[in-house]
Image (cartoon, rainbow, N blue to C red):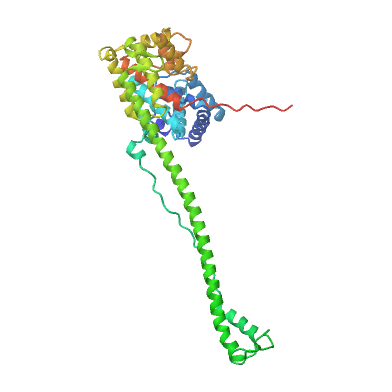
Amino acid sequence: MQSFLNARLFDVSADDARLERLREAATDLSGTLKSSPERVASFTMVGIDREVGPDEPIVREAVAILGKRWKSYAGAFSDEQLPTVARAIILQALADVVGNDGSAAAISATSRNLLPHLGSRTDKAVWIELVSAAESRLEERATREWGLPSEGLTAPRFQVPEHQPIAVPIVNRDFLKGKMAAAVGPNDEEGSALKGANPYWPNSGQSWSHAFTPIAVDGIADVIDAVVARFAKTLDTVQTSSSIGTALQDFAQGLAHSTQATVHVLERRSRLLWWKEALFSPSSGLSYRELNPAIAAALASVDASALTGAFAPRMAEHFVTEAVRRIDPDAMTTSLSLVEMAAAVQADASPAGEACRGAMAPMHASPGRTTLASLIAGEVRIDAGVLAVRTGLEADTSMTPIGFALWLFREQQAAAATPRVAKRVKSLRR
């Protein structure tokens, strides 16, 4: 929001109350995007296009949200300014959701596609901070999912758990001596009367009883101490064995998880390498070299997206680029009309065309700006007019089949990262 104001793209007349209303509208819109993440790509497409018109449905939606917070907004902005105001609201809303990995992926992929083609139609300085944040978050997530094998194979260290030793009780010899002396006779060795003592002396005499007491006490105490010590050692061993067993179980589970994650990464990389070398489409059962460039490029994007998953590192795009180039170096590097390539995939009735549209069919199609892949899978026939209105691209846009494949790959990555959230249906009790 502040970026638009700093660039003087519109003015709130230094009125903080007006700025607060705009921010409140952006917060409301970010709530919409959080509950419907599949729309992030379409809102990004609108937000980065400086020449988007007031009739664009997404612009209207943003303005309608503003109207709920600010009834008299029309008096503050002209009709010509409203698309810019809507874009500022969209930018702030996207900044609010970029902390989500899926939203970051959609913002990043969409920006990579559109920014190079919009040229002067976008104010890159306004968007650079958001795009950079999205790129960084996406790369962090991709790095976690595509960690190097050497990192994945590092086993977790096992640490023997500390345990509290059981305190060994010691017999109170002085206390026991007094008790034993009292049991032997009425007086102790010094002739002092003992409390609660036996009033009778043993027949063996006093000297015997006085000698008997310390010897008996020491012997009894030593026996008791030894028994208690052995008992405590047994308890201590049991406690240690139990804690070590638990620690070993946790260690084994951590090691299994680490190994499984590493195997998954290695398998994913292996399948991707195998795919690049074979140039064979697993989704259609056809060789890409049997297809015309547009169909081959689109089908390669579908297969690559399925192999990489939603969060792929930036190098995956270069991998796809080189794989498509190998299909036919000359044909795949020759610029073609984007409308013609998209229309060819949409109209192709072969298994390859059906595989492309089938993979793209689940992608969200916005009533306004929407992804090229969703148009290919849709029922509206693609022509120059549809391309310009629904994607914001110039009707005469051209690119190589490699660029076409990369464009569709990014859109499918964005869609995979922001799936439609299932809505909860409240049941009514009668």
Q: Residue furthest front?
A: 204
Q: Position of residue 392 (x, y in %)?
A: 40, 17
Report the residue at 25% width, 13% height from top. 330
Left or right relative to 247: residue 180: right
Figure quadrant of the C terminus? top right
Q: Work out whether residue 124 or residue 305 is closer to the camera in this orientation and state it.
A: 305
* For residue 178, above or below residue 243: below
Q: Position of residue 19 (x, y in %)?
A: 48, 34
* For residue 169, above or below residue 395: below
Rendering quarter of residue 428:
top right
Rendering quarter of residue 314:
top left
Q: Residue furthest bottom?
A: 191
Q: Work out whether residue 383 or residue 341 is closer to the camera in this orientation and state it.
A: 341
Left or right relative to 1: residue 203: right
Q: Work out whether residue 70 or residue 330 is closer to the camera in this orientation and state it.
A: 330
Q: Work out whether residue 86 or residue 138 is closer to the camera in this orientation and state it.
A: 138
Figure quadrant of the N terminus? top left
Q: Residue furthest left?
A: 330
Report the residue at 40% width, 14% height from top. 284
Q: Is residue 37 visible?
A: yes
Q: Is residue 138 visible?
A: no
* For residue 97, above or below residue 283: below
* For residue 153, above or below residue 345: below
Q: Position of residue 236 (x, y in %)?
A: 50, 60
Q: Position of residue 254 (x, y in %)?
A: 44, 43
Left or right relative to 146: residue 227: right
Rendering quarter of residue 410:
top left
